[in-house]
Each structure stands twice: as structure tokens, then as C-alpha cells.
Image (spheres, rainbow, N blue to C red):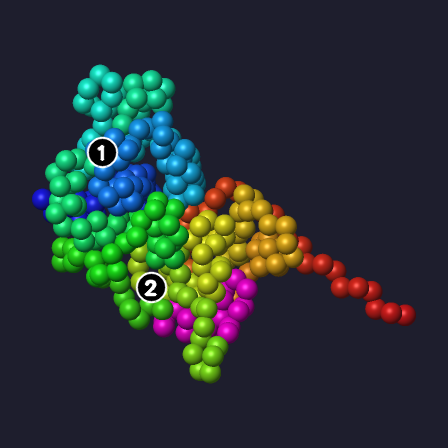
Amino acid sequence: MNWVERAAELRQWSRSGVRAPHKPLLMLYALGRFQRDGGGGSGGDGALAYSAVESDLRRLLAEYGPPHRTSPSYPFHHLVSDGVWEVRTDRGAGSPGTGVRELRATNAAGRLVPELRTALRREPSLLGRMARTLLDTNFPPSLHEELCAAVGLEPDPAEPETLSAARRQRNRRMRERVLTAYEYRCAFCGYDGRIGAVSVGLEAAHVRWWAFDGPDDVDNGLCLCSLHHKLFDKGVLGVGDHHRVLVSQHFVGHSATARTQVTELSGRPLMGPQPGTRPVAAEHRAWHTAQVFHGAARPAVTPASPPPSPV
């Protein structure tokens, strides 16, 4: 059994670029618990009681899932069909379904299947390879470190296992092409810091995530500073019609910095790209708005009127 390939296939049912990270999030959580518990849970078999992990899974889905809400009961039940997870209740083997009350009432508990647990104990590096595959195929790199921390994972620093030749490879020149198109300046705030001739704190962000068939093309990229890249990938910021900045109404920040760096960006036109360069394509903007951006956008900020000239 190629467990890394099995991890890569968890989201293949998704259609038309719709994000469905529910199973991968549960799988990452289960791997994190397996790693932390040394291969066993409080009962010695690595079982995770639904009632005990429900709040953790709900938080992960709210923070890293798509904008629409989904109950953690769905991946807890449906992951069984992928051959990596099993559920038992007071009645015996098998999940009672996706009903939250039923999962709680029957003391449902899930765990990695015995064959996978055995493979992970026999080959410790397998856990890191599976985790990196789940991250690469479902989330942008800007979220990997914090997501690992959220599920309690410490990925193996070794190179991930090579997947089938049919899997796409990233274009290493995309960063250079995107930063050049935007003249090495954040498209949201205009930051353009350098140390000598080397830019610092600027990154090429995929609008439609690479993990969801987003191409390594300039019209699917934005040059963003590190702060705004993270906020863009977390759905706080987006790009709307006429290439203006969207700011989620869910964002809350009371400091002057939060206002100037986030809320006051609402409705501001993007800075760039250079004339003659294609701006972000409408289909990529639409994907990000539907799959990543959280909630409705704030109204555009009206620039303050200048003070009257002294008489």
C-alpha cells in the first residue's frame, strides 16, 4: 500500500475547484495525535472519541476550511470510505452516520486503520511524508507552518516522497515574473523594502491556489508583502471587480495599524501590474472570492477630505 499516494487522493472527489479540505484536516489532526501520543491514545489504541475532539475539529474547519460551514461529523464519518480511518461505537465496528447526536450518544471513536498504524510505527518518516503531501495538495505554503502547529504536527524536515509523474511541478520562475510585473511592490499597500539590491518581505501569491489547479501564470499571481500574503490566503483580503481590494467584514482590529494595514484598504485599487502585463484573470478572482474569502466585503473606505486652506 502506498500511503502517501492514498493521502494525496483524499480530495479527488472535489469538482470545479471547490475546496473540500475536511478529510485532509481530520487526517492531519489524527497524524498529529498519533505522533504526539507515540502511536497510541489514552486507551492505548490511538482512538479519538468524537465528543472529545469535536471542538478541535470545528475550530480547524472554521479557520482553514472554505467559507461555508461544515460539521466535523462529516469528515469523521466519510473518511472511513478512503481506507485510512475506522470508526467504532458501543454497538461495534462501523460509523453510525453523520448525525452529531448519534455520534455522541454511541460514544463513537475513530482512529487510523491498523495497517496504517503498523506502517507508521515501522517507518517513522512515513508520517512526515504523508503530512507534507496533505499540506501540499490542499493548502498554500503560507499556511503550512501554522497549520502544523494547530494540529500538533512536527513534520519530518526530509524531502517529501516523490509522487507519480503525472503530478504537476511548481514553476520556480513564477516568483521572479510576478514580482517583476508588480515592480517589486506589494499590490495592496505598496511596500517595497530591500536590503541592498535584494527585496525582503515580498512574495508571489497564487490567487487560485496551486493545490487547486491554479496555474503558475502572472495573471494568477500578486506581489504581496508577507503580512498581506498571509491575510489574503486566510480570506481576510480579496480582489473584487475593477481590481479593487476586498476586506472581510469578519475581520476585527482596533489598533491604528490594523486600520491602516487592513480595514482602510477596502475599495482601494491594486497597485500594478505594469502596463502591458495582464492583471489578475476574472476566473481566478472569482475562485478566490468563492473558496477563500470570508463573508461579505466591507464598504469601500471614502478618503478623508483635505483640511480647508487657511484664509
Local SS, label 2: loop
Magenta stretch: includes residue 61:
no
Position of the N terminus by quadrant: top left
Q: Measuring 43% from the left and 63% from the top, which residue is drawn there?
A: 222
Say which of marks 2 and 1 sits in front.
Answer: 1
Q: Is residue 187 left or right of residue 282?
A: right
Q: Magenta segment, which residues?
A: 176-193
Which callout, 2 or 1, points at the residue further toward the start of the chain? 1
The location of residue 52, given as percent across then percent down, is 36, 30
Q: Nearer the viewer, residue 145 or 152?
A: 152
Query: What residue would you read off at disc 1?
Result: 44
Q: Is residue 169 left or right of residue 55?
A: left
Question: Which amino acid does the dot numbered 1 rest on?
Answer: Gly
Q: Measuring 13% from the left and 58% from the top, which residue is drawn there?
A: 165
Q: Is residue 15 visible?
A: no
Q: Pointer 1: residues within 10 angstroms few (<14), some, or many (20+)?
A: few
Dividing the picture into quarters, in which one does residue 221 lie?
Answer: bottom left
Local SS, label 1: loop
User: Does 78 sit above or below residue 162?
Assistant: above
Q: Main secondary structure of the magenta part?
A: loop
Q: Nearer the viewer, residue 119 or 9?
A: 119
Query: What residue would you read off at disc 2?
Result: 217
Question: Which amino acid does the dot numbered 2 rest on?
Answer: Asp
